[in-house]
């Protein structure tokens, strides 16, 4: 039986035109998306899931929230024979995991957020323990009373996964759903997705590795090909190659020799409120240090603490939520003349300008980002990978000694990772701290995995 059927049609979302060939997704089947980041697969997924960050235009008709229950019933996209865009279908039958989880998480605490999603999907659970038991699979059962805004990036991603998969969803749509997850919870997410498929659900997925797709039995793909003025979407087969291992080796070989300079960041047993673990590491001027570790260790919070040492300007995003004044101990030291900057995990929250040349006032850096043809574009309409490059470029150009890059390869394929390395090469004297779960970046510098036993 078909879970989702799409007739041949044309659609326009956020100034991107799509020409879609007819395709269908059967019960228990998952489709991959094969697309360069510039093809804006996230917008296509938004359209297929019926979640509108902006009003899509379908075959010349503008659809607004006021017409969601009427005009959309005539669209050529159907969920099990009915319209997938009604409010009831949206919450009860379609689960989505697209974009920054900060934008989809609305509740005050983890348990309030999840119970609200359960109530929308299948009615109020009999008691709170039901919700807590389900959150245990996502490693959140011990954090149910924690405010969602103080969760780590990986914990927010896990909560968004739990919300998207709650209830008896027929269709699950996800974009780079494991990008912020450590190995343990990446596997936990894949196990939950397998159960969804075994129960007859369907999925459309973007940004997983070939090994992840293989474990889910994915063989078919929606292939997005940018053409003349539009992106062509057709059903094809999933290409077999997975360059993750070779790409990691190639990226490291593309680093040019760095110039070691005087100065060193020394972090000794740093502790902070809400995080019971401590971390120690060093990075000299001109060196690169890559930090990884389990979700919830506070790696992003540590970056904020480092920035706060000299009351230096971080890159746009407010970081007061880290409660620096309540730091519990340890030491963070580096030269007074170092002016540290931070590129945050989700770049959409840092993009403030309406013109790329205003957002990134350096033609040389625009070219290094591969955005020479988008100088006059609104940076908020760039794909996630392009926005991430802009955020990283700005953090690098503003730093005088130290830069911290939080998940800098978010949403990037091999081509965009090469641009990222090119930007880092352009500043050989900076001390660079990279916080990432991306194995392709682990060989870029001295690798340190933060561990719980440091508590």
Image (tube, rainbow, N blue to C red):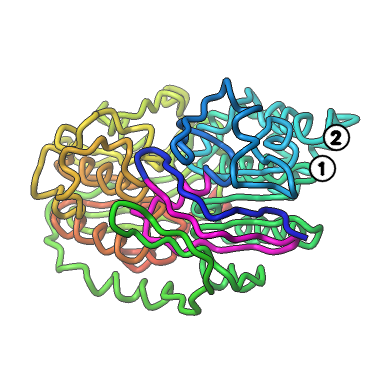
What's the CA distance linking mark 1 and mark 2?
A: 6 Å
Report the quarter where the N terminus lies: bottom right
Give residue 380's position: percent from left, percent from top: 32, 35
In the image, 445 versus 328, the foreground residue is: 445
Q: Which residue is mark 1?
A: 133
Q: Is there CB contact under 8 Å for labels 1 and 2?
A: yes
> Which label is found at residue 328?
none
The image shows residue 216, relative to residue 265, as above or below, that is below
In the image, 258 versus 227, the foreground residue is: 227
SS of the residue under disc 1: helix
Callout 1 crowding tier (Cα within 10 Å): few <14, some 14–19, many ≥20: few
207 with respect to 36 (left or right): right
In the image, 8 versus 268, the foreground residue is: 8
In the image, 239 versus 343, the foreground residue is: 239
Q: Quadrant of residue 67?
A: top right
Q: Which residue is mark 2?
A: 129
Callout 2 crowding tier (Cα within 10 Å): few <14, some 14–19, many ≥20: few
Give residue 47's position: percent from left, percent from top: 52, 43
Q: At 78% from the left edge and 42% from the top edge, which residue is drawn? A: 167
Q: At 68% from the left edge and 43% from the top edge, which residue is drawn? A: 94
Specify the segment rendered in magenta. 17-46
Q: At 35% from the left edge and 68% from the top edge, which residue is drawn? A: 443
Q: Quadrant of residue 49?
A: top right
Q: At 47% from the left edge and 57% from the top edge, which residue is drawn? A: 437
The image shows residue 278, relative to residue 204, as above or below, that is above
């Amino acid at each position: 039986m078909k879970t989702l059927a799409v007739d041949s049609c044309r659609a326009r979302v956020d100034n991107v035109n799509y020409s879609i060939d007819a395709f269908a997704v059967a019960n228990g089947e998952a489709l991959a998306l094969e697309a360069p980041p510039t093809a804006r697969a996230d917008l296509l997924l938004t359209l297929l899931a019926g979640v509108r960050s902006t009003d899509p235009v379908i075959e010349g008709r503008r659809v607004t929230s006021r017409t969601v229950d009427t005009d959309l019933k005539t669209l050529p996209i159907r969920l099990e024979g009915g319209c997938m865009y009604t409010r009831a279908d949206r919450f009860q039958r379609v689960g989505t995991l697209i974009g920054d989880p900060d934008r989809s998480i609305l509740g005050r605490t983890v348990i309030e957020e999840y119970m609200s999603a359960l109530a929308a999907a299948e009615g109020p659970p009999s008691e709170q323990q039901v919700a807590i038991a389900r959150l245990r699979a996502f490693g959140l059962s011990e954090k149910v009373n924690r405010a969602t805004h103080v969760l780590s990036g990986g914990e927010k991603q896990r909560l968004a996964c739990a919300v998207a998969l709650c209830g008896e969803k027929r269709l699950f749509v996800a974009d780079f759903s494991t990008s912020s997850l450590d190995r343990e919870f990446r596997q936990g997410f894949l196990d939950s997705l397998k159960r969804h498929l075994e129960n007859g659900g369907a999925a459309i997925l973007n940004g997983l590795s070939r090994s992840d797709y293989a474990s889910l039995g994915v063989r078919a793909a929606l292939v997005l090909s940018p053409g003349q003025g539009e992106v062509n979407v057709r059903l094809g087969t999933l290409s077999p190659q997975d360059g993750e291992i070779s790409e990691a080796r190639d990226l490291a070989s593309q680093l040019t020799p760095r110039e070691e300079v005087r100065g060193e960041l020394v972090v000794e047993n740093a502790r902070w409120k809400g995080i019971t673990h401590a971390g120690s590491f060093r990075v000299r001027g001109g060196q690169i240090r890559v930090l990884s570790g389990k979700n919830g260790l506070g790696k992003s919070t540590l970056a904020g603490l480092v920035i706060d040492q000299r009351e230096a300007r971080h890159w746009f995003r407010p970081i007061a939520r880290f409660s620096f004044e309540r730091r519990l101990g340890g030491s963070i030291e580096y030269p007074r003349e170092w002016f540290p900057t931070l590129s945050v995990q989700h770049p959409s929250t840092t993009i403030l300008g309406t013109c790329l040349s205003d957002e990134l006032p350096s033609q040389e850096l625009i070219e290094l980002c591969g955005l020479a043809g988008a100088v006059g574009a609104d940076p908020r309409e760039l794909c996630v990978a392009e926005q991430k490059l802009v955020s990283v470029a700005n953090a690098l150009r503003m730093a005088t000694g130290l830069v911290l890059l939080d998940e800098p390869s978010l949403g990037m394929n091999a081509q965009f990772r090469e641009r990222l390395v090119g930007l880092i090469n352009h500043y050989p004297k900076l001390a660079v701290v990279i916080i990432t779960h991306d194995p392709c970046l682990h060989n870029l510098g001295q690798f340190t995995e933060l561990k719980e036993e440091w508590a």
